[in-house]
Image: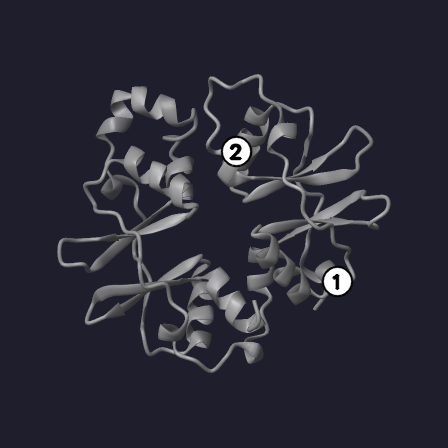
Amino acid sequence: MIVADIMSRDPLYVEKTDFATRARQLIRDNHVRGLPVIDPEGRVIGIVTNQDMLRITSTRSNVTVAGFTVSVPLITEEMDMMDAARLMFQEKVTLLPVVDSPSSRMLRGVVSLLDIFKHLDLSRVPDKPVDAIMSRDVITARPDDPISKVWDRMLEEDITGLPVVNESGRPIGIITRFDILKRGWARLGKEDMYRSKDTAKIRVEKLMSTPLYSIKRDAPLRQAVEVMLKHDIGRISVVENDVLVGIVDRYDLIKAVLGDV
């Protein structure tokens, strides 16, 4: 399958002279992992990532996108989607701009790792157990953790979600950036969160999503892909005797299919 088959057309984008706070708002409101950046002639010059934009505070209203733009490879619609995935892993980004040609650099769309995951060929998923690729040192949250603490941890570690566990280590839910953003608790930037007495009182248990989908550590990778596609989730917890022992996300599974990243 090629990029043209899976890419998002007419994507959101920003110009390099736009204020970074505008990019942050677009990312926050549309729940995207990044945005292409274009110059005044409409040519793609790179991307801005949600990681950088969500760190921007409301006091930095005069900073432009140009200072946060990351140079990335530009791809065309004819590229194989797994070659695009390989490029993303090499560049440590989660999306790439699609242009009409490398010389003109006119934006045609974007392709993300999410687009690729949704179109994975299940026959190419290795016949391995989840235990072979799962992350074992899982960062977790507790139900009584304040949202401000969890939000900071997500930005520091560049992760989009944390399993929520009880005192026994049993997973009971998940808290994601989307859960926090859709309720508006992070809409003004980190320094505003700390100033808000209401935010200081909000605990993870009020915003977390349930149920938390789990899988046993000896389950095949293909089963993990199928569960995540069925429920449209970005990660799945791995359990043993109902205790969290690991986590697998979309990126782990795409890497497993690529095999050589």
Q: Position of residue 246 (x, y in %)?
A: 31, 64
**Residue at image coords 48%, 34%:** 54
Name the secondary structure under disc 2.
helix
* Residue at mark 2: 53
Name the secondary structure under disc 1.
loop
> The N terminus appears in which quarter of the rendering?
bottom right
**Residue at image coords 26%, 68%:** 239
Is residue 177 found left or right of 18 in the rendered image? left
Q: Nearer the viewer, residue 111 or 260?
A: 260
Q: Which residue, as the protein is rendered here, is positioned at the far bottom?
A: 127
Which of the numbered marks, if any, corresponds to residue 79? Answer: 1
Q: Position of residue 117 (x, y in %)?
A: 55, 63
Q: Residues within 10 Å of mark 2 (few under 14, many from 20)?
A: many
Q: Nearer the viewer, residue 125 or 179?
A: 125
Q: Position of residue 123 (x, y in %)?
A: 56, 80
Q: Which residue, as the protein is rendered here, is positioned at the far left?
A: 167
Three-letter amino acid code at the position of disc 2: Met
Is residue 214 found left or right of 249 in the rendered image? left
- Total number of numbered discs in the rendering: 2
Query: In this picture, is 103 found above or below 137?
Result: above
Query: In this picture, is 259 found above or below 163?
Result: below
